[in-house]
Amino acid sequence: MGRRMRFSAFHIVTLALAAVLGICIWSLWLAVNSDRDNIHPLLNQLIPAGHCACHTAAIFECDSCLRCPAQLPFHDTVSSSSAPPTKNFFDPLEYSYNETQCTTLFPGLFEDPIRAQSFWTARHGIKRTDIDNIKMVDGMARVAIYQGRLYVLRALAKGEDHRRKILGILASIHRALVSAPQLAAILNTEIIFSVEDKLEDVAGLDHPLWVLARKATEESVWLMPDFGFWSWGHIDTQIGPYDEVVKHVEEHELPWEEKENKLVWRGKLSFAPKLRRALLEIARNYAWGDVKEVEWKNKANYLSMDNHCDYRFIAHVEGRSYSASLKYRQACRSVVVIHKLQYIQHHHYLLVSSGPQQNFVQVERDWTDLPHKIQELLDNPIKARTIADNNVDVFRERYLTPAADVCYWRALLQGWTTASPQITETMSDPTNVSNKGIRYESFLLLDPSNMMRFRP
Ligand SMILES: *[C@@H]1O[C@H](CO)[C@@H](O)[C@H](O)[C@H]1NC(C)=O
Ligand SMILES: *[C@@H]1O[C@H](CO)[C@@H](O)[C@H](O)[C@H]1NC(C)=O
């Protein structure tokens, strides 16, 4: 399978983890191969939740999470059913599924909040001083949730990009609150989040910060879904809410038979030159390669997001950090080809790189095995088609739906408040303290220039 292990000073620990991962995958392989749809419940019990080895690997690998026992950070109850629900089972646009429904519908989605909760619980919980110690810099906002209402206490945006991302995150939290089936169950709390690409740009390693992506070693942070699920658009690109993008793709996508039998990639090389140039260099030698740099000056080689779906194979490359474009590539009924990732986003736990559930193709970070992997897909179109179908079933139609998004946000909040009881205990009514904060609803009405450096 070509798994690579990075050996640290703690060989033994690493070996033990490798063994656990090996047994986990081996068992799942056996189960999956012997009976495709029906995994023995014993196997699910063998794999402890939140131990998918992705937490410790230098390079994020987490093939098994789609089949980890579904367990929300809410309670200690394991979902009785781990079989993926059928498509008709749920409404992808529903915002108010309850805990039980979320757990049943989206097994494996809540891995990162579970991981972060365990991390902080082992450290005796998050204290108010832990968030007070986070130095507020551009790209961060501090918010409070009090009696089910969202308050903005502080927001720092360097420019329009930050401001829009912060609004997208606030709006997502607000939506998860107003659609909660039991608002009273959501505890009062305070949170600081960052919309910057990298943790190291804004804070050190030990802070309980909410972020968009983390490296495996950045264990203290909590992963949020990115702002694009709410909506994204920049000065001259209007992308819209993710579910609108998906709807548009579904209505306009070419049938598989008519898609180009090629690997497409368009982007800016300078964001991650080594990674991106390697792809360009390798792909240019093959007839299946359609990899080009976009020159933004004259829009040369530009390809709309929709048109990416015209290809059977779509390459994805990390940028400076994670790349929010992955979810748009996953919106196509195509095979997404990804190098081994270093940055983890909330939904990466669901990526499966082999077996009958395979939903993407993984290659080395230097792309050296790309020609071999693409040739395999060209030689075996049925396999390619299956991977593309799995990609759609898992991401576009289930784990990246609005229903999954709000379930995730509420699970994140629940995991967070469970790990930070002292913050809840020391909350005061934000409306009864002068200069404390303003309601999200009022924040929205501020002039953009007043949002940028917001401090009541
Ligand atoms: C969630 O909703 C389902 C269906 O309405 C219901 O059967 C279940 O008891 C609810 N669970 C909780 C925890 O409220
Ligand atoms: C408001 O705060 C003051 C002191 O800061 C306190 O005495 C009072 O009880 C608070 N009122 C409410 C309704 O919490």
Image (cartoon, grey):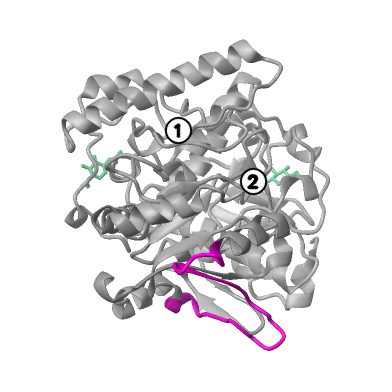
Picture quadrant of residue 59: top right
Q: Is residue 374 above or below residue 205?
A: below
Judge by depth and name the residue closer to the eye, 371 or 402: 371
Picture quadrant of residue 226: bottom right
The residue singled out by tag 1 in the image is: 73
> Residue 291 at what x, y percent from top left?
55, 69
Q: Amino acid at mark 1?
A: Pro
Contact, mark 1 vs mark 2 (Cβ under 8 Å): no
Q: What segment carries the magenta color? A: 283-307
On-image quarter of the C terminus? bottom right
Picture quadrant of residue 341: top right
> Residue 329 at what x, y percent from top left?
46, 64
Q: Is residue 96 visible?
A: no
Q: Is residue 282 visible?
A: yes
Ligand 1 rendered quadrant:
top left
Judge by depth and name the residue closer to the eye, 284 or 40: 284
The disc placed on residue 210 is 2
> Residue 20 at what x, y percent from top left?
45, 18
Q: In terms of secondary structure, what is the magenta stretch mainly?
A: loop
Residue under the image location 74 percent in, 39 percent down: 131
Check the image and name the residue furthest to the top. Answer: 12
**Residue 273 shown in magenta:** no
Q: CA distance from mark 1 to mark 2?
A: 16 Å
Mark 1 vs 2, N-terminal side: 1
Element at badge 2? strand
> Residue 62 at what x, y percent from top left?
46, 36
Q: Amino acid at mark 2?
A: Trp
Position of 423 with respect to 252 (left or right) is right
Position of 63 with respect to 270 (left or right) is left
Judge by depth and name the residue closer to the eye, 160 or 437: 160
On-image quarter of the N terminus? top left
